[in-house]
Image (tube, rainbow, N blue to C red):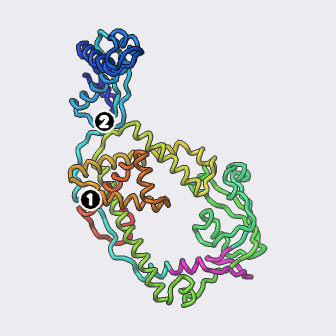
Amino acid sequence: MNVETLAPCKRLLRFEVDVKAVEEAFEATTREFIKFAKLPGFRPGKAPREMVLKQFEKDIADDVKKKLIGDAYRQGIKDQKLEVLGYPDIEEIHFERGKALQFAATVEIQPQFELPDYRGLPATREAGGVTDEDVAKAIDVLRGQAAKFNKVDREAREGDIVVVDFKGTCEGKPLTELAPTAKGLGEQKSFWVEVKPTSFIPGFAMQLVGAKAGDHRQLTVDFPSEHVSAPLAGKKGDYEVDVVEVKEKELPALDEAFAKSLGAETVEKLQIGVRQDLQNEFNQRQKRNIRNQITTALLARVDFGLPESMLEQETRQQVYQLVEENQRRGVPKEAIEAQKEQVYAVAQNISRDRLKMGFILRRIAEREGIRAEEHEVSARIALLAGANNIAPGKFAQELEKNGRLGEVVYLVVSEKVMSFLHEHARIEDVPREQATQAS
């Protein structure tokens, strides 16, 4: 058998089975057919050889070819110690009686790489925890969600809501003409905008400070260079704005009635509950940040080629997810289509890192003897079944039927490996602002 390297994870295997082995296979298969052949006028196993050969010549040849190719392929993979992914692509078959059998098989194999040092990977962790200020801000957000908006007869201030009618242009043309998919940016009636720097288009709302009902304003904004509507990205926009009315935000009092509206008996119990929720979020964020750093550190320490078909399949899935996510965010189909090359590039980068990390985690699991226990797999299946609103038993049957049970096992193993890496990481506690940058 000859082996040719076509790509880092692709091999072309060329096989030849000698004439003697081909003839022996024909003889053995013919005897089997004679033993069980049913021909008119003869009991099974008693039909003349010539009649069996004439009746089943093609079937015998097909069975011989299949058996010889299968046996040669399996032995060749074993001899070469190749870890093959998926099924081989068998081609260039030369097969006839009295001649050697020749064929080629193109296979994808597991990436070959040396594991880097994975114990003691560096990571930073946000020191401290939830502060009184964090609790107060979170409660203010809750109060904001229950706020009333009262019409006022005065000039707008920061924090107010200004109701406006507007029309926008860019380079002297209506925005809807330059960017048809950006209808919400081009013209609106009775549009509510909160007077703060980040509202609507950056810079738009703060130019309304001092405006009152009945005023007309001309505003200029700079569309971000990464704006979702490509025709507007990095350009200036001009707006004609009519102020309809100004509304003042009125927050509910932080009292027992407000606490009870959120299911807490007292303000103190509301604060305790909010603190606990924030602490849970803090713990999850801290864990996620550390694991992101571990992933980044591992990926930077080893490089290897990936199986092309796996990368292609994973990229397609990521493209689908990115498109779906953008659609949920309200990005128009036309805008997504206009950026399909960027979407594909992002999807491919995500897929490359995911696949690399998957191979690395499997190798660490093998080296450290980390396995998925039966009860752990069952627990993960129950969790996934609950998320999909399906009975665990039925969900498990569907996974097994579709050949996806291995995916659940991998989820369990990868989580255990990440826990192992987290446990053995070299973690440094740093102030909040530094931890945010590091994560």
Question: Is residue 157 visible to the viewer in this orientation of the structure?
Answer: yes
Which residue has dot 1 on it? Answer: 421
Residue 195 on image: x %, y %: 63, 72
User: Spatial distance from mark 2 to mark 1, Cα to Cα?
Assistant: 28 Å
Q: Residue at x 71, y 61 (%)?
A: 239
Q: Is residue 145 highlighted in magenta?
A: yes
Question: Is residue 103 visible to the viewer in this orientation of the structure?
Answer: no
Helix, strand or loop at disc 2? strand
Q: Is residue 9 above or below residue 160?
A: above
Residue 425 on image: x %, y %: 25, 61
Left or right of residue 147: residue 358:
left
Helix, strand or loop at disc 1? helix
Which residue has dot 2 on it? Answer: 84
Q: Residue at x 70, y 81 (%)?
A: 150
Depth order, front residue of 316/241: 316
Depth order, front residue of 300/214: 300
Q: Is residue 288 highlighted in magenta?
A: no
Residue 132 on image: x %, y %: 42, 83
Q: Amino acid at mark 1?
A: Leu
Magenta extent: 139-161
Residue 300 on image: x %, y %: 31, 50
Which mark is first along the chain, 1 or 2?
Answer: 2
Rendered-image quadrant of the C terminus: bottom left
Left or right of residue 208: residue 358:
left
- Snapshot quadrant of residue 112: top left
- Snapshot quadrant of residue 111: top left
Q: Residues within 10 Å of mark 1 (few under 14, many from 20)?
A: many
